[in-house]
Amino acid sequence: MKTPQELANDGFTQSGATRYVTTSTEYCQQLFDRSIALGENDKASGLPREVTHDHVRAAAAGLSIKSMDKSTPLSVSCQVGEYVCAALAGVGGGKLDAVWGILLFGISLAIGVILFVTRIMRSS
């Protein structure tokens, strides 16, 4: 792990260095815990646990996949709402000659954009 001085020399701000150290520590703990669990699962009964490089590699791959999956109930709900708003905007867009069509189109479009921005902002 890098020292605070090395991080400062590499351009990390104080808050960036703190976040880097915290994230690294948490990741290392998760990697350790998963590696131990995989080694424990593979051991024969009555023998001591052995954590091999395959266990560590599998644990790292599992953490990598887990970090890519950022689906939350909020993001799923927003995405479903976006689809509903797109469908309603399509219905309203087909009836722009009527007041209700214009209202349905405009309101659905506005809500859909708000849901999209909310989902994107929460996922990054």
Image (cartoon, rainbow, N blue to C red):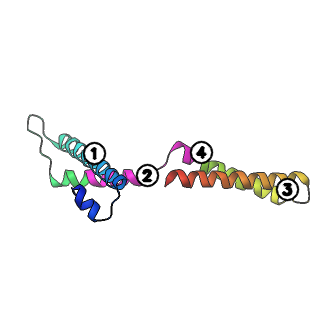
- Residue 35 percent location from the top left of the image: 21, 46
* Number of the label disc, if any, that sits on residue 69: 2
Q: Secondary structure at mark 1?
A: helix
Q: Quadrant of residue 106?
A: bottom right
| Crowdedness near tag 3: few (<14), some (14–19) or many (≥20) residues, C-alpha within 10 Å | some
| Amino acid type of the residue tagged 2 in the rendering | Asp
Residue at 28 percent across and 61 percent down: it is 8
Q: Residues within 10 Å of mark 2 (few under 14, many from 20)?
A: few
| Residue range highlighted in magenta | 59-77
- Local SS, label 2: loop
> Element type at marker 4?
helix
Residue drawn at x 71%, y 56% is 86
Cα gap from disc 1 to disc 2, whole angstroms: 16 Å
Q: Does residue 11 appear left or right of residue 52 in this picture?
A: right
Residue 30's disc is 1
Circle 3 sits in a helix, a strand or a loop, which is it?
helix
Rendered location of residue 110, percent (x, y): 73, 54
